[in-house]
Image (tube, rainbow, N blue to C red):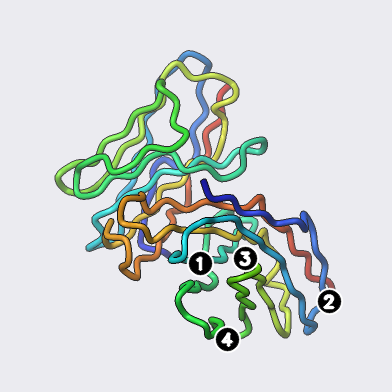
Amino acid sequence: DSGVTQTPKHLITATGQRVTLRCSPRSGDLSVYWYQQSLDQGLQFLIQYYNGEERAKGNILERFSAQQFPDLHSELNLSSLELGDSALYFCASSVSRLAGGQETQYFGPGTRLLVL
Amino acid sequence: AQTVTQSQPEMSVQEAETVTLSCTYDTSESDYYLFWYKQPPSRQMILVIRQEAYKQQNATENRFSVNFQKAAKSFSLKISDSQLGDAAMYFCAYRSLNTGTASKLTFGTGTRLQVTL
């Protein structure tokens, strides 16, 4: 158990719908990262938050957004869903955003999203 | 941009034997971290081992060790005394240490390891 929790574990929805994925980082971790794992794109970085602020964006679609709350949990919002959004979405957390620190990203169990 | 290449989509090893998974990467940076993550059928991403680029000594974690060749930009994972529980997808990942760069992980495409009796 990495200490990172994600809910829900599975999500089935229809095209055009909107869903919210939730992540609680390990105790003490300030950074949260979202990754998408799909068959055709592999594991891709979406976005990073540090202590409530957006730190970096990767290959995140405009239909997707995220935020990190004062209690440090994070939510990833996916809207206008398409079939191609079906994937495993991981949240990871680490202690600090500071480069040079010995931070390691610990992954949650993921949310499996299926868009029908 | 950094890229990570895993050229072996699948590997197989007999129980108790040793197997080496390959990873190469491309970067212009001198300071970075490299990781191997394991993803078993449960799909959980589990950290196996980490290597700091400034360290010449290869990292070791029990039966897992790496061969880090900085000049060649190569980072292979050796699994000794393979066990059935080692069967999984293994991902090589790169993380920059530049202060102006986000701490994202860049992953390779993975190597699926089968362990046979």
Q: Nearer the viewer, mark 4 or mark 2?
A: 4
Q: Are marks 4 and 3 in contact (CB under 8 Å)?
A: no
Q: Nearer the viewer, residue A84 or A21?
A: A84
Task: Tell me which residue sits at (73%, 79%) in the image.
Answer: B82
Q: Nearer the viewer, residue B68 or A86?
A: B68
**Residue type of the residue flagged with mark 2:** Gln
Q: Which residue is mark 4?
A: B62
Q: Which residue is mark 1?
A: B47
Within 10 Å of disc 2 (Cα), the crowding (few <14, some 14-19, many 20+) is some
Mark 2 lies on a secondary structure that is: strand
Within 10 Å of disc 3 (Cα), the crowding (few <14, some 14-19, many 20+) is few
Task: Tell me which residue sits at (31%, 37%) in the image.
Answer: A75
| Left or right relative to A101: residue A14 | right
Q: Which mark is residue B14?
A: 2
Mark 1 lies on a secondary structure that is: strand
In this view, B51 is above or below A53: below
Looking at the rendered structure, whether the residues under marks 1 and 2 are on a common chain is answered as yes
**Residue type of the residue flagged with mark 4:** Asn
Looking at the rendered structure, whether the residues under marks 4 and 3 are on a common chain is answered as yes
Q: CA distance from mark 1 to mark 2?
A: 23 Å
**Residue type of the residue flagged with mark 1:** Leu
Q: Which mark is residue A20?
A: none
Q: Which mark is residue B73?
A: 3
Q: Earlier in the sequence, mark 1 or mark 4?
A: 1
Q: Earlier in the sequence, mark 4 or mark 3?
A: 4
